[in-house]
Image (spheres, rainbow, N blue to C red):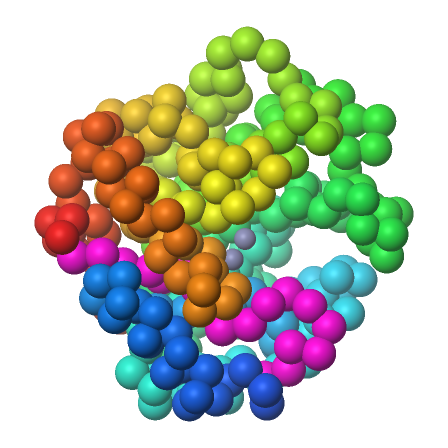
Amino acid sequence: MLTDYHVHLRPDQEGSTAESYFTSANVDRYREAADERGIAELGVAEHIHRFVQSLDVWRHPWYRYWAQDDIDAYCDFVRSHGLKLGIEADFLPDREDRIANVLDGRPWDYVVGSVHFMGEDAVDVHGEPDWEAWDIWRGADPERVWSRYFETLGEAARTGMFDILAHPDLVKLFGNRVPAPDGDLRRFYERAMDGIADSDVAVEVSTAGLRKPVREMYPAAPFLKMCLEAGRPVALSSDAHTPEQLGYEYERAVEWLSDLGVKELAVFEDRGRRLEPIG
Ligand SMILES: [Zn+2]
Ligand SMILES: [Zn+2]
């Protein structure tokens, strides 16, 4: 069985309103793409910062800019269209209770946890004039950024708040467009591994990295091997923001997983997990 759980029904851009994208016609486009690509399990995981309720978690400029939609209307829409219901929630240290207040009591099939922010800065924002003021890469020491990123990732796993740990080595996404550390990167991965090993989280394998400047799968093979040795299951997703991106490069991903000895994928329902053979 193939899955695509970390999927957005719309691009991250101006004018991508709920009214224009949370429609039956749009869901049909995603479902057709899933059928074509043999993806039996299709779910969506909208960014938490798109919902007004996220302002109770954080009043960061990014959140204030994007928070426009109602989270319960989203849940109703997704459920009524027969998709698995997820959300992509930022891990924000010291805000766990506030995040839990938004997540608890809502009918998720799974919660995708992401480390996008370290402090006020986002690791996946670079060279966008509007957000330049909090570009983490300005004058950054890559050793420090990477160390902190993976420490935060381990903390995110350890909270137990998330079912899936998204794009685990997101910090690499800009490739050599930003300063990058040298040598064996496992010294960074190890900083996350205690938290991941102590958790029950599924580790996302995401083909989205292949679309980014780094042109690599998330996570790198050595990182995934460490997670597998720690007994963590794999969740496969594309982080699509359009129907065209659904299941992006899945043939390559399936082959890559097979080479790494992964034979099963995590499947989610009502925040429960089971394993199914990769189909
Ligand atoms: Zn993300
Ligand atoms: Zn995403």
Residue 268 can be seen, yes or no: no
Residue 214 shown left or right of residue 180 in the figure:
left
The image quarter in which residue 196 lies: top left
Q: What residue lies at 67% left-to-right and 41% top-to-bottom? A: 123
Q: Position of 28 compared to 156: left or right?
A: left
Q: Residue at x 24, y 37 (%)?
A: 255
Quarter assignment of residue 222? top left
Seen in the picture, residue 86 relative to 226 is either above or below; the reply is below
- Which quadrant would the N terminus be assigned to in this image? bottom left
**Of the pair 269 and 105, the residue shown nearer to us:** 269
Magenta highlight range: 1-18
Where's residue 214, x and y in %? 57, 34
Predominant secondary structure in magenta? loop
Q: Nearer the viewer, residue 278 or 246?
A: 246
- Looking at the image, residue 113 sits to the left or right of residue 57; the answer is left
Give the residue drawn at x 80%, y 44%: 127
* Residue 236 spot, x, y in % from top left: 32, 50
Q: Quadrant of residue 268?
A: bottom left
Q: Position of residue 187 (x, y in %)?
A: 50, 15
Q: Is residue 1 above or below residue 19?
A: above
Left/right placement of residue 173 relative to residue 225 reads right
Give the percent coordinates (x, y) of residue 16. Answer: 65, 77
- Pick the front one: 247 or 111: 247
Residue, x 76% and y 48% (percent of image)?
Answer: 120
> Is 72 covered by the magenta stretch?
no
Q: Is residue 14 magenta?
A: yes
Q: How many marks?
A: 0
The answer to whether residue 11 is above or below residue 204 is: below
Q: Is residue 129 visible?
A: yes
